[in-house]
Image: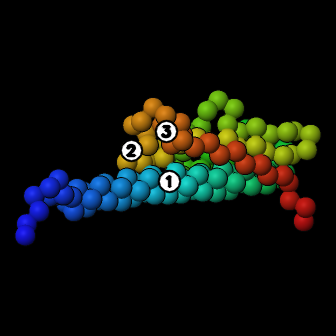
Amino acid sequence: MRRTSGESGLIGKVIIVWVLVVAVLAVVVLDGSSILITKFRLSDAAATAASTAAQTYQDSHDAVKACTAALGTLQQSDPSAGKAKGWCRINTNTGHVTITLHKRAKTFVAWRLGFTAGWTRVVAQEYAGPSQL
């Protein structure tokens, strides 16, 4: 005996829902990974630039020369990193350097949505001091 109740097509609907759930989860994982990788790479570039600037300042005691050396390091490690006004600050008393960079992570969906767009803007601030050796 055949049933002709409202169950027809139920399996197809369940499969479609599961496919949509998996697709949304995949986008979330990919966008989250992109944001984390961007943060890691930007932090690494800022740390390298800060170390270079601190070493240059320790050798020359010239803040402009130290920031120029940091800029050269940044152009090699991450040329697309954004640098705002005051991105390279040097404490001339201690020789400590602060490098601040920003970048937008390349995501599939997160930057397009208003409530998640802020998460794609990554800011890295790294510090370095003079070598103790």
Q: Is residue 6 above or below residue 120?
A: below
Q: Earlier in the sequence, mark 1 or mark 2?
A: 1
Q: Would you say 24 lies left or right of 47 here?
A: left
Give the labeled residue for mark 2.
Answer: 109
Q: Residues within 10 Å of mark 3 (few under 14, many from 20)?
A: few
What's under tag 1, amino acid-wise?
Gly
The residue sitting at 27% across, 59% down in the picture is 14
Does residue 111 appear in the picture of this structure? Answer: yes
Q: Earlier in the sequence, mark 3 or mark 1?
A: 1
Q: Position of residue 119 (x, y in %)?
A: 54, 41
Q: Position of residue 123 (x, y in %)?
A: 62, 42
The residue sitting at 29% across, 55% down in the picture is 17
Q: Which dot marks residue 7?
A: none
What kind of element bears circle 2?
A: loop
Q: Earlier in the sequence, mark 3 or mark 2?
A: 2
What's under tag 3, amino acid-wise?
Thr
Give the labeled residue for mark 3.
Answer: 116
Name the residue nearer the viewer: 96 or 36.
Answer: 36
- Distance from Cα at disc 3 to Cα at disc 1: 11 Å
Q: Would you say 118 lies left or right of 22 here?
A: right
Q: Are marks 3 and 2 in contact (CB under 8 Å)?
A: yes
Give the labeled residue for mark 1.
Answer: 32
Q: Residues within 10 Å of mark 2 (few under 14, many from 20)?
A: some
Q: Residues within 10 Å of mark 1 (few under 14, many from 20)?
A: some
Q: Position of residue 39 (x, y in %)?
A: 58, 52
Q: Position of residue 120 (x, y in %)?
A: 51, 42
Asked where in the image residue 90 lies, by quadrant, the reply is top right
Residue lying farthest to the front in this orientation: 1
Does residue 69 appear in the picture of this structure? Answer: no
What's under tag 2, amino acid-wise?
Val
